[in-house]
Image (cartoon, grey):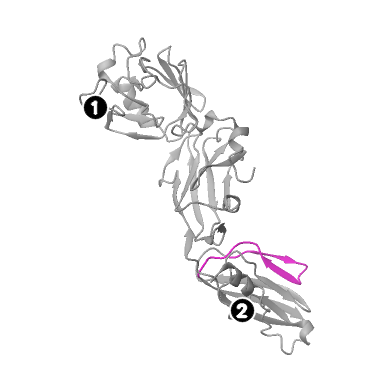
Amino acid sequence: MTGGAGAVALLAAGCGLGSAGSGGSGSAVTITPANGTAQVRPDGTIEVKAGGGKLENVTVKGATGAPITGRMDGRRKWRSTRTLVPGTSYTVTAQARDGGKTRTVTSTFTTLKPERTLTVEDVTPSLAGEKVGVGMPIILRFNRPVTDRAAVERALKVTPDKPVEGAWRWVGSDQVIYRTKTYWQPHQTVRFQADLAGVNAGGGVYGAADVRRTITIGAAQITTGNIGGHHMTVKRDGRTLRTIPFSAGNGETREFTTTSGVHLLMEKGDPVTMTSPGRQEGDPGYYKTVVNHAVRFSNSGEYVHSAPWSVGSQGSANVSHGCLNVSPSDASWFYDIAQRGDVIDLTGSDREVEWDNGWSYWQLPFDQWKRGSALS
């Protein structure tokens, strides 16, 4: 069924069930879509009108999905305020009072089942029980390219306990990222909802289902370090926890230069096998090393990790391939406290981290970040 046919269904005459004996056609209650209508567009509107008397209550129950909310207009008209789940059945029940009598009117209809639907393939962060850092973005990946990005973005809502300005930025046809203007306030809950069910995403694609996530922001753990000074300081909620000597990239090539800029901790592993990018065994500069307590902070192979072989250089010289080499005890300690989304702000090298290298989104000024929104 084409979109045009679905539109016709929405414009069909309203159902006058229950209007008989209510004082004539002027007192009828009509519901659109009419009873028995099929192929109703999910992004259409349910409308209830009282020809006489006043509407007392309107409810909409669907076979699946979130409740359908609506707004009353002068007790004579009610309109739904959100989209409908594709391919499902709905029953509208309206109660109206006229001449001292309350009458109930119903209409049951079904929505269009599109050939293609839009779903959220992944939400980051969404690990059960996880606490994340104050720089954490919200990253959505969809199952297919989004044609009408503005329509989809309007369905996305972020509600923190402690309000802060934020914006979405599209980084591809199937991925959008939310970042705040300033860091999240620590120790709070952030609620994310995507009211996607029934949203017209363009090209005949409709949102299949809503998505809800609860994100827990942990302590404000911010690490600052100077690459030339060979030390980094770790603070939690403004209090210094530890200053750690390190050995950074030796700078012999761009590849072996640790990046300056605001990074976010992305993941951790123990152990992690590190290999030289773009090189085969036997090539000059090839390496393959297994490291313990590794915390990633970029997509160009940068980690904070245990390096017992370079303890003598830590705090005084940069000899690594680009990572921050620290002692086994410091690496274990940092690994244990690290949260995804924690900030690590490094200075002192001539290689600036790119804003789209890993989660280094804080490298973009917020005004520039907002330009990536479909609603800007």
Mark 2 surroundings within 10 Å by alpha-carbon count, few (fewer than 14), some (14 through 19), many (20 or more): many
Q: Which residue is nearer to you in this view: 53 or 320?
A: 320
Mark 1 surroundings within 10 Å by alpha-carbon count, few (fewer than 14), some (14 through 19), many (20 or more): few
Mark carried by residue 200:
none
- Quick check: 9 left or right of 260? right
Which residue is label 1 attached to? 288
Residue displayed at 54% across by 57% down: 196
**Start-end of magenta stretch:** 68-87
Mark carried by residue 107:
2
Residue 95 located within the stretch drawn in magenta = no
Residue displayed at 37% across by 22% down: 255
Q: Is residue 259 above or below residue 182?
A: above
Q: Position of residue 177 (x, y in %)?
A: 52, 42
Q: Nearer the viewer, mark 2 or mark 1?
A: 1
Q: CA distance from mark 2 to mark 1?
A: 68 Å
Residue displayed at 52% across by 24% down: 238
